[in-house]
Amino acid sequence: MNIQFFNTAFSNPALLKAIENSGLYQPEFLLDKEGTLWMSGFLFRKIVNFRLLLFEENFLQLGTYDIQLRKFLKSAVFTEFRPLNRISVKEENLLNQLGFSKTDWLNLIVKTNSVSEIWEKVSDVKKRQIRSSEKYIKVEEAGSEDDVDAFYKILFKLYRQKVRKPLPHYNFFSGFYHHVCGTGYGTILTVKHQDKVIAGMLCSITPGKSMYEWYVVGMDDEYKGKGIYPSVMITWAALEYACNHKIPQFNFMGAGYPEIPYGVRDFKLDFGGELVNVGRYIKSNKPFLFQLGKMYILAREIM
């Protein structure tokens, strides 16, 4: 399979290798006759055979192979496209022709040209929290399997007690650390207090284009009132990382539905950036099973 032309954050072979052992995702591919990868995504077989396709590249060329694309889309109960950036009118029209319906969905994107430019747009409250936290913590990339394990344990607790959404097995995070970190296509950042991991973030990266917040957690309740703000510091660390590695933008990977209040969006907006209505596009092949899956997804957002 020839994938160098589509070697982006969510289609590079190192990430797909980690996904295979996630216990939640299964990598999906759409190839042309020469075996070149046009598009990759994730299939959730545990959730009524739900295919999720994340894309950041222009995909108009897919219309050239209309029959093959339609066959590909029919193999799942329903397929959802989640653009990572704003798409063009022509691309949206193509999705409409293929039978997709759009739901408004926001992303928050921060331009990461320089640390000083970002700092100017950070809210005064977050600036005070960053200055306070810096006295007590250390920010670094995960340097061992122990760091990854500590990050995952905090994340698992969050998902079990509050988020209540599906979470990949630890094998995914371990595989990401061993196969993706160090390649330029991803990193796992940590915040430590007295050598203990108190926050972490797993990010995918398209070099020279964008850095994506995928999984993030901070032990905010445990450090409340102590002058340490784990979630604030891990977010600031990611923005600094993007600047220092010359990645033009940081994509928060979702800021909710436009007309529904969302505390996570409010938190992210304190770091500046632009809200972009990228939308989500869904095509159903089996209406009854689709409605079952839709109720599940609405109740427990997957990503």
Image: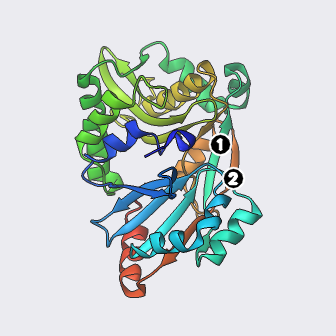
Distance, label 1 to label 2, CA atoms, is: 7 Å
Location of the C terminus by quadrant is bottom left
Looking at the image, which residue is at 47% across and 52% down?
35
On the image, the x and y values in percent for residue 90 come to 75, 65
Q: Nearer the viewer, residue 292 or 198?
A: 292
On the image, the x and y values in percent for residue 240 come to 58, 23
Q: Nearer the viewer, residue 70 or 205?
A: 70
Lateral position of residue 89 relative to residue 17, left or right: right
According to the image, label 2 marks what residue? Answer: 276
**Residue 69 is at least partly visible in this image:** yes
On the image, the x and y values in percent for residue 221 come to 36, 37
Q: Give the structural element (helix, strand or loop) at label 1.
A: strand
Whether residues under marks 1 and 2 lie with C-beta atoms below 8 angstroms apart, the answer is: yes
Looking at the image, which residue is at 59% across and 30% down?
126
Give the farthest residue toward the front: 34
Q: Is residue 290 above or below residue 81?
A: below
Looking at the image, which residue is at 51% across and 50% down?
36
Kind of residue at badge 1? Ile
Q: Quadrant of residue 82?
A: bottom right
Q: How many residues crowd mark 1 within 10 Å: few (<14), some (14–19), many (20+)?
A: many
**Residue 104 is at least partly visible in this image:** no
Kind of residue at badge 2? Val
